Amino acid sequence: MQGNDGITALMTAAVTGNLEGVKILAPFEIGLKNIYGDTALYYTTHEASNKECAEFLSNYPEERKTKELEEVTNKFNLYFPPTPKCACRTAAYSDE
């Protein structure tokens, strides 16, 4: 369910860093966009930097194929430089 502005519960969970909420809501709301075309993945790096939620959401192809992918990835790497344990950077550019 989306509000008039397109905001979903998944986006709200992502912006507040509620990883458990993100995990529960993702199967139902993944890939939905607000009126500006932003997805939940966008909110994890632009509105509130949250590494765990960003890594979880980046595993969904529906989130990775959004207009802001490059911008999100660049900002994510600025706040959380890639490490050997972080597969999110590789996953974001995967063509699965």
Image (cartoon, grey):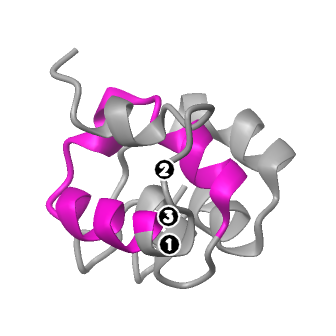
Give the residue furthest to the top.
96
The residue under label 1 is 45
Above or below: residue 68 compared with residue 25: below
Between discs 2 and 3, the one toward the N terminus: 3
The residue under label 2 is 82
How far apart are the alpha carbons under marks 2 and 1?
A: 15 Å
Residue depicted at x 29% and y 41%: 64
Q: Please identify the quadrant where the N terminus is shown.
A: bottom right
Q: Which amino acid does label 3 sit on?
A: Gln
Q: Can residue 75 be seen in this view?
A: yes
Where are the magenta residues, as a range?
50-77
Q: In this view, does 81 lie to the left or right of 96?
A: right
How far apart are the alpha carbons under marks 1 and 3?
A: 21 Å
Rendered location of residue 89, percent (x, y): 38, 42
Above or below: residue 3 compared with residue 63: below
Q: Can residue 38 be seen in this view?
A: no
Q: Is mark 3 on a helix, strand or loop?
A: loop
Residue depicted at x 33% and y 59%: 73
Q: In this view, does 23 lie to the left or right of 33?
A: right
Residue depicted at x 50% and y 72%: 45
Q: Is the magenta stretch mostly helix, strand or loop?
A: helix
The residue under label 3 is 2
